[in-house]
Amino acid sequence: MQRLAPALRQDNVPLDLISLIKTILAATKEISFRVSQGHLGDVMGSTLDENIQGEVQKKLDVIANDLFKDILLESGFVKAISSEEEDHSVAGDENGKYIVSFDPLDGSSNIDINSLIGTIFSIHEAPTDIAAGDDDMFKQAGNSQICAGYVLYGPSTMLVMTTGSGTHFYVLDRTHGGYLLVERNVQVPTDTQEFAINMSNQRFWQAPMQNYISDLLAGDTGPRGKNFNMRWIAAMVGDIHRVLCRGGIFTYPADSRKAEQPYKLRLMYEANPMAFLLEQAGGLAMTSQGRIMDIEPDSIHQRVEVIMGSKNEVEKCLSYYK
Ligand SMILES: O=P(O)(O)OC[C@H]1O[C@](O)(COP(=O)(O)O)[C@@H](O)[C@@H]1O
Ligand SMILES: [Mg+2]
Ligand SMILES: [Mg+2]
């Protein structure tokens, strides 16, 4: 099994980017250990604080955020970071070559039930004409990401990452403490009979999504002529990992629960990194209006509609919006 650094060198990843990636992964090893300790690791439960998203922060949201923030800002590689748990971007080294957006703990509602959770990250080059700490430097479209990945804290701790030369799977080897490459160039099947959506929001969806999902549910008695199964892990890392492993369509569509906030998932540290990983694996990552990675961001916590996964099924879903 190949170790991480030689695998990245094989993809011609620059040495300082490899160092930055290793810095990020050092924090994930600490989180993986804390998570595996569960109640013993004092990671369960909520704080009394709310983040800028209006969500009560879980203890592990804050622990993970502080771990990433500290290790990245001290690294010297990073001009600034932006996190789901930080109101604004945080300045690092003015000469840092990179900027990192991250979701320190994805699937927070799963922490206290010992279910699947993860960390998501996205790396861009740092603009030289904007000062560290100015949120504007993060307003870069997903198509200019140079690296994206997630770490899934599951039965095994897995890293799924791309630097633009395919999407690869790694496993954290607890015997020597490093990530080992287990699968190169993962390919998402183009067709699927598995969908993921939070069905409890059905009455709030727009008509095209209502129609698309009801045709899936009609199965072989309906226009699709085949049966579909449903899965919902309530952690994007878990649902997208399943799609990367065996295909599927994952969607968090627009809904009318809150008129001023029709979307749930965040562009910079959820949708964009997952889009890069899926596209590099032959999948599609769209909104009903276009390609997620072509969206020009206007704020670091911007939310978007998400329809992603197996190519032909995503196209089928989008045909309902035409
Ligand atoms: O609670 P819902 O509506 O099922 O939403 C689940 C979605 O929310 C999220 O948990 C949001 O992410 P965070 O846990 O990082 O806030 C996604 O991982 C997941 O896909
Ligand atoms: Mg998240
Ligand atoms: Mg989160």
Image: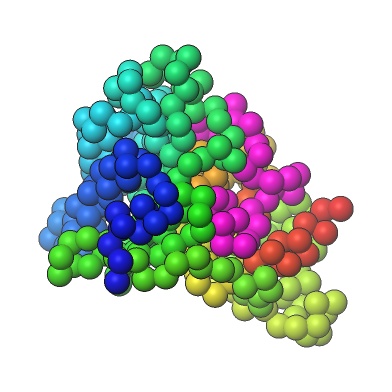
Please give the name of the residue rendered at 15% of the width and 65% of the height, measured from the top-left corner.
176
Residue 38 position, x and y percent, is 20, 62
The N terminus: image quadrant:
bottom left
Residue 230 position, x and y percent, is 59, 74
Please give the name of the residue rendered at 35% of the width and 59% of the height, measured from the top-left corner.
7
Please give the name of the residue rendered at 40% of the width and 65% of the height, measured from the top-left corner.
169
The answer to whether residue 229 is left or right of residue 159 is: right
Would you place residue 126 above or below residue 262 in this image? above
- Counting labels gives 0
Give the residues in magenta. Answer: 274-303
Would you place residue 197 above or below residue 23 in this image? below
The answer to whether residue 262 is left or right of residue 126 is: right
The answer to whether residue 268 is left or right of residue 215 is: left
Image quarter of residue 92: top left
* 154 or 111, nearer to the observer: 154
Residue 322 position, x and y percent, is 86, 53
Residue 247 position, x and y percent, is 59, 71
The answer to whether residue 294 is left or right of residue 288 is: left
Q: Is residue 105 visible in the rendered structure shown here? A: yes
Which coloring applies here? rainbow
> Is 126 in the magenta?
no
> Is 279 in the magenta?
yes
* 141 or 167, nearer to the observer: 167
* 204 or 299, nearer to the observer: 299
Q: Residue furthest left?
A: 40
Please give the name of the residue rendered at 46% of the width and 35% of the height, measured from the top-left corner.
124
